[in-house]
Amino acid sequence: MEQNKTRIAVLVSGGGTNLQALIDAQARGELGGGEISLVLASKPGVYALERAANAGIQGMVLARKAYESADAYTKALVATLQQEGIELVVLAGFMIIIGEEMYKAFPNRIINVHPALIPSFCGQGFYGLHVHEAALAKGVKVSGATVHFVTPECDAGPIILQKAVDVHEDDTPETLQKRIMQEAEWKILPLAVSLFCQGRLKVENNKVYIS
């Protein structure tokens, strides 16, 4: 008899390239007993919802604009995810600030991918191309991506996986962003999800141990 699959929700605000990496990994049977049950967007009309529909995954819009505060939005988000029986929440380009209640409802069950090697180029204001602009301005020779558990402090949660990517001298923020996505983000995000779903991640003293 097949074991119950870990129900995963992927939260999105845009095109959903990392979502696609997860959908592809799922199609290859590489999510370690996890299943994407829901793709939830913070606004209507984003391409990520089309990706979900193409893969036969339930898509839903919970529009941030419909709620007067971050707390009200967080309450609705938690209620929706609990209603759907979600066990793991993956933030894949979800550009919304989430309130405290979310972390209490899903402790060490929310993961995010960040396009740099934390603690470099992370925290407030470091998102999208800003991260790669800062890395190039600093002249770093390697950058990469980090998958971490999400905590109330921005980009400060326990690190699950990291992968380094070489920076080329002629890189632009756009070329570096693309290489980090292809060589790091799209590989370590599905792997981290798989490890979670296999029950192989343990958090102690803000560190993740992989068994």
Image (spheres, rainbow, N blue to C red):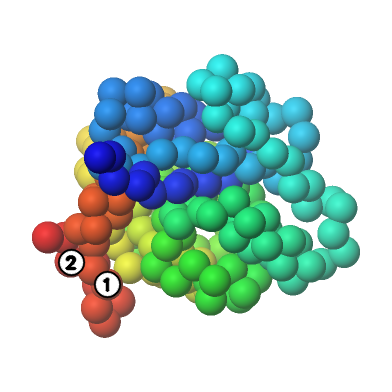
Above/below status of 125 relative to 136: below
Of residues 33 and 163, the one nearer the viewer is 33
Q: Which residue lies furthest to the front in this view?
A: 1
Looking at the rendered structure, the secondary structure element under dot 1 is strand
Above/below status of 121 relative to 33: below
Asked whether residue 144 appears in the rendered view, the answer is: no
Residue type at tag 1: Val
Of residues 23 and 119, the one nearer the viewer is 23
Q: In which quarter of the image is the N terminus?
A: top left
Residue type at tag 2: Tyr
Q: What residue does disc 2 label?
A: 209
Residue at screen point 87% across, 53% down: 66
Q: 211 left or right of 55?
A: left
Above/below status of 205 relative to 167: below
Neighbour class for label 2 at 10 Å: few (<14), some, many (≥20)? few
Residue at screen point 56% across, 63% down: 124
Q: Which of marks 2 and 1 is nearer the N terminus?
A: 1
Which quarter of the figure has residue 25?
A: top left
Q: Residue furthest bottom?
A: 205
The image shows residue 210 at horizontal and vertical percentages of: 16, 60
The image shows residue 3 at horizontal and vertical percentages of: 29, 45
Q: What residue does disc 1 label?
A: 203
CA gap between label 2 and label 1 equals 6 Å
* Circles 2, 1 touching at the beta carbon (< 8 Å): yes
